[in-house]
Amino acid sequence: MGLKCGIVGLPNVGKSTLFNALTEAGALAANYPFATKEPNIGMITVPDDRLKALSDIVNPQKILPTDIEIVDIAGLIKGASQGEGLGNQFLGNIREVDAIVHVVRCFEDGNVVHVDGNVDPVRDKEVIDTELMLKDLETVEKRWEGYKKSAKGGDKAEVKKAGICERIKNHLENMQPARTFELNSVEEEGIMKEMFLLTAKPILYVCNVDENSVINGNEHTKKFKELVANENAEVLLVSAGIEADIVELDDDEEKLMFLEEMGLTEPGVNRLIRSCYKLLKLITYFTAGEKEVRAWTIREGWTAPQAAGVIHTDFEKGFIRAEVIKYKDYIEFGSESAVKTAGKMGVEGKSYVVEDGDVMHFRFNV
């Protein structure tokens, strides 16, 4: 798919520890600022219980989950938009991702230094937001000046574009991220997309907490949730320390016992991965046969031919039809043949929009 989430935040908030728990990549996670200089890139498997349920029915030779790409980006500090610290590098890296996972520190620990001396997730968020918006303002102002110059010749389209640009500029100057800007038309949406604004990217907040706060949170997480309440963004409570301990356990039974001791039903990274998937507006469909049961990633709203193209471009080019079984029906009836006998298999054409969980078989001719 080529879509990826970027993990961002101030130095020493737990970004690299979380990245390692997600990917088991062994990236450097150290107790000093800018331990991460170059972005770490990894693939993370998307946990999906439906894959196992289908496999229990089909009993395939292989089970293949789907995955997404995650990027651990260098820590940002105040002044990044003017190149302070690793600012230019950070902003360049974040421009390349499709969605943002913003990690804030919500735990007290005298052994882990904070770049600003004390723990304050509200302040930390505002530092990141300010730097991203300042960079976006720089981008928008350049574009606005260009449109105004073109509009002097009487070009009505350029006059309109200049007006839209000015509205976006005013929105940013009021310290509001571009993602909350109200778009009134497809044209406005196109103009914003052309600018590749940093604050237009969808965002997920992760509060990195101590192990005692992973279920109910603490005063830091309470204040942070109040701050972002109007952003319509998800906030997850995750303990990077717990996740790092889970990764060290080799045995699944040991992991389960450890989770139970912590009062958890699954690792926090599982919730985080699923939230990243949702943030990127991705869904999963399945193929199921004796050789393999496999999960495939597509975008929400994709048609059957587009979904087929993920397997092979020839499937899309020569698409004839798709045989579709709803996941719920597959589990209820217990086999493909039983679903067919019950008349629950759909035969869909090129306009069919794939739904999350569809079990599909494609007919094609090239």
Image: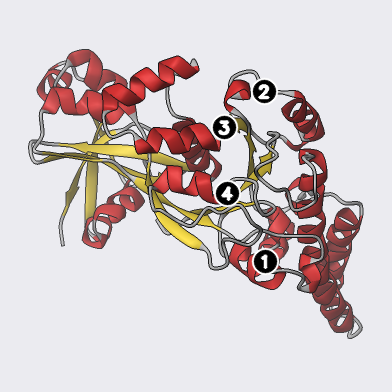
214 is higher (above) or lower (below) than 290: above
Q: Nearer the viewer, mark 4 or mark 1?
A: 4
Tell me where residue 96 sits by quadrant: bottom right
* Number of residues whose C-alpha sits closer than 10 Å to that of mark 2, classed few (under 14), some (14–19) or many (20 or more): many
274 is higher (above) or lower (below) than 312: above
The amino acid pointed to by label 3 is Val
Circle 1: element type: helix
Q: Residue at x 48, y 61 (%)?
A: 40
Marks 1 and 3, Cα distance to the nearest angstrom? 25 Å
- Residue at the farthest front position: 111
The amino acid pointed to by label 4 is Lys
231 is higher (above) or lower (below) than 187: above
Circle 2: element type: loop
Q: Are marks 4 and 1 in contact (CB under 8 Å)?
A: no
The amino acid pointed to by label 2 is Gly
Estimate the x, y position of residue 334 in percent, counting from the top left: 16, 17
Q: Residue at x 75, y 37 (%)?
A: 231
Residues 328 and 318: in front is 328
Q: Quadrant of the N terminus?
A: bottom left
Q: Nearer the viewer, mark 2 or mark 1?
A: 2
Estimate the x, y position of residue 238 in percent, counting from the top left: 57, 32
Q: Does residue 36 show up?
A: yes
